[in-house]
Image: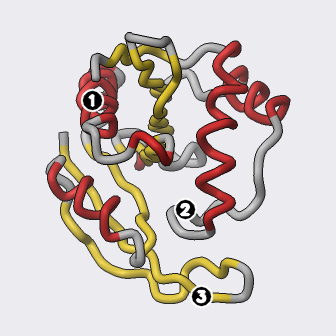
Amino acid sequence: MNLLVREAQPNDAEAIVGILNPIIETDMYTAFDTPLTVDAELEYILNFPQRGVFHIAVNSSDQQVVGFQTLEPFATYTHAFDHVGIIATFVDLSYRRQGIGKSLSEATFKSACSKGYEKIFTYVRADNSNALASYLRLGFNVVGTAKKHAKIKGTYVDEIIIERFL
């Protein structure tokens, strides 16, 4: 598949929600537990941090948005973490394992460096072994495990803490 990776735009809100909500509804891949509205996603895009990176992947053959990735400042209450970003990656359920996450990450890492980030951090559900393996292939390392970190529909889920230096 030929991909175009570009910055997210307000008119991408519907496509992003179309990817994210089915993932949320599986109760398997993310700690998000409430589907989003297009209006909520539009507001998120419009208020996205200036130092953030928000990329979408578009299938060049049919212009369908097939994935997206965000990188936001880890914390804004202190400058001690200005060099750290927190990343999230979502790929359409029907397009997984086709290199979309890798393409998004390559673009995001480049943009992150230009914005002064030195380290990327995130959490991955411990039961999402494919996502963890993908991040590890991208150079992330496991820092630890947050036990019972998420509670989804009454069930506790551990989260693996990972990081990557740029």
Residue at mark 1 to residue at mark 3: CA–CA distance? 32 Å
Q: Classify mark 2: helix, strand or loop.
A: loop
Q: Classify mark 3: helix, strand or loop.
A: strand
Q: Is residue 20 above or below residue 13?
A: below
Q: Pick whichever, 57 or 124, lies toward us.
A: 57
What amino acid is labelled 1 in the image?
Ser
**Nearer the N terminus, badge 1 or badge 3?**
1
Label 3: how many Cα within 10 Å (few below 14, some 14–19, many 20+):
few
Q: Which residue is mark 1?
A: 103
* Residue 125: image location, x then y, percent: 45, 71
Q: Is residue 31 above or below residue 127?
A: above
Residue at horizontal 72 percent and vertical 20 percent from the top: 46
Check whether the beta carbons of the residues at disc 3 and disc 2 lie within 8 A of each other. Answer: no
Quarter of the N terminus within the rendering: top left
Residue at mark 3 to residue at mark 2: CA–CA distance? 13 Å
Q: Which residue is mark 3?
A: 156
Quarter of the C terminus within the rendering: top left
